Image: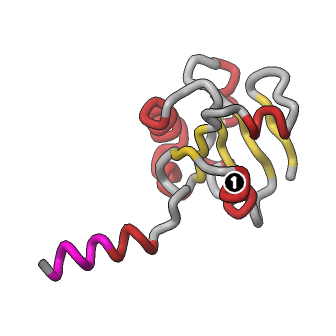
Amino acid sequence: MKNILGFLLFLSLASPLAARCRTASEAEFKAAALGKTRVVFFASWCKSCEAHLTPDYAKDSVFVTSYDNAEIADEVLKKFLAAEADHAICIVDRDERLAMLYKLKFLPYVVPI
């Protein structure tokens, strides 16, 4: 029982946006973006997005997808970010609010913040 409670406490303290792609509110996105230098909009089917899905971008970017579900986005980031995928922040923009906020026009779309 102690192990289960400890695990649940660990999950509650862990960053809700790190390592795995998740849906987030605009406020959660803004909090996650503090200290980052860019937002990278991507999609699993976008071949030209691969140039911006590199381990070098993992620590200073927020990755956003409006077109994939969390599982697919996770797979894409793990493939291209390799070991750095666990440090990446990934948000699924399910209602496309972030796409509208940043005036998404094409993919990949990289916005300095």
Residue 84 percent coordinates (x, y): 52, 52
The residue shown at (51%, 34%) is 73
Specify how the rendered protein is coloured: secondary structure
The residue shown at (61%, 24%) is 67
The residue shown at (62%, 41%) is 54
The residue shown at (27%, 72%) is 7
Above or below — where is 23 with respect to 50?
below
Q: Dividing the picture into quarters, in which one does residue 46 lie?
A: top right
Residue 45 percent coordinates (x, y): 58, 17
Label 1: few (<14), some or many (≥20) within 10 Å?
Answer: some
Residue 107 percent coordinates (x, y): 75, 23
State which region is magenta.
2-8
Front residue of 8 and 63: 8
Which residue is the site of mark 1? 29
Q: Dividing the picture into quarters, in which one does residue 23 lie?
A: top right
Residue 44 percent coordinates (x, y): 55, 24
Is 26 situated left or right of 1 in this image? right
Above or below — where is 104 with respect to 92?
above
Above or below — where is 26 with respect to 53?
below
Amino acid on which disc 1 is placed? Phe
Magenta segment: does it hold 98?
no
Element type at marker 1?
helix
Task: Give the residue furthest to the left.
Answer: 1
Q: Main secondary structure of the magenta part?
A: helix
Numbered label tally: 1
Front residue of 98 and 20: 98
Is 62 situated left or right of 92 in this image? right
